[in-house]
Amino acid sequence: MIMGLAKKIVRWMALEHGRASGLYRSLCAPMNDEYAEFLRRHGRLRQVGDHCLINSDVTITDPEYVRLGDNVCLSTCTLVGHDGSIAVLNRAYGVKLDSVGKIDIRDNVFVGHGAILLPGVTIGPNAIVAAGAVVTRDVAEGDIVAGVPARPIGRVDELVHRLEAKTQQLPWADLIMRRDGGFDAAIEPELIRRRVQHFYDRDAEPATSCKDAPAVSR
């Protein structure tokens, strides 16, 4: 009961006043929609659009230069708005350099786990950055990019068609059709049960033992 009250107080302090953000992330473990709202109010980003989802362990080094459109999902990724080598170069060469850039993520973009977006890039709209990708240049509308550095590997509209056909063949397709959004607490237990049964509990033919195997003619 005391812990529940503490979480409510910390959540209120964070969402309403932007205080105790570190404690808020560790103690309250906010869902990605709630954390997106926290960043909208107190994260200093240029813009956070509607229906965004942002993991609480995302790293945004220079939020003032970051703009997010509508329906953007940031997994556990890193957005870097400056070149960290500048301080070393300035001291080593006796110069005064600057190297920063915006990160402009348009509508309907997903950025996967471990991806790194470097300064001066625009992503999308309607694009996917695969897990582990390092984005060094703009990602065109509708592209799927992957790799280091990130390169186009497909198109989002084609992926949607393939996944739609695949989903219709799943043993739990009826639950997906009934699900409200990407997660529905009322359906989730049955969804997990069917998936586990499909993955692990299907009848398998017994392995053939050595003594049952046919002799190999010589």
Image (cartoon, helix red, strand yellow):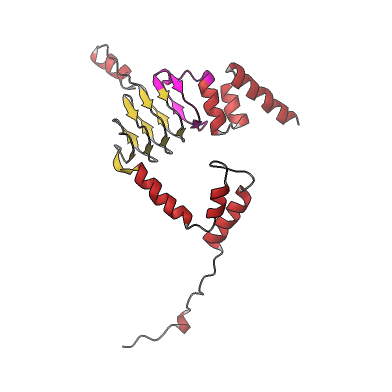
Q: Say if 46 sits above or below 155 in the image.
A: above
In magenta, the rendered stretch is 41-66
- The residue depicted at 59 percent of the width and 32 percent of the height is 29
Q: Position of residue 169 (x, y in %)?
A: 47, 58
Q: Say if 90 sits above or below 211 in the image.
A: above
Asked if the stretch drawn in magenta spans residue 65, the answer is: yes
Q: Quadrant of the C terminus?
A: bottom left
Q: Position of residue 35 (x, y in %)?
A: 54, 28
- The residue depicted at 41 percent of the width and 36 percent of the height is 111
How many marks can you see? 0
Q: Position of residue 150 (x, y in %)?
A: 30, 37
10 relative position to 55: left or right = right
32 relative position to 102: left or right = right
Query: Dividing the picture into quarters, in which one does residue 145 lie?
Result: top left
Q: Position of residue 171 (x, y in %)?
A: 53, 59
173 relative position to 112: left or right = right
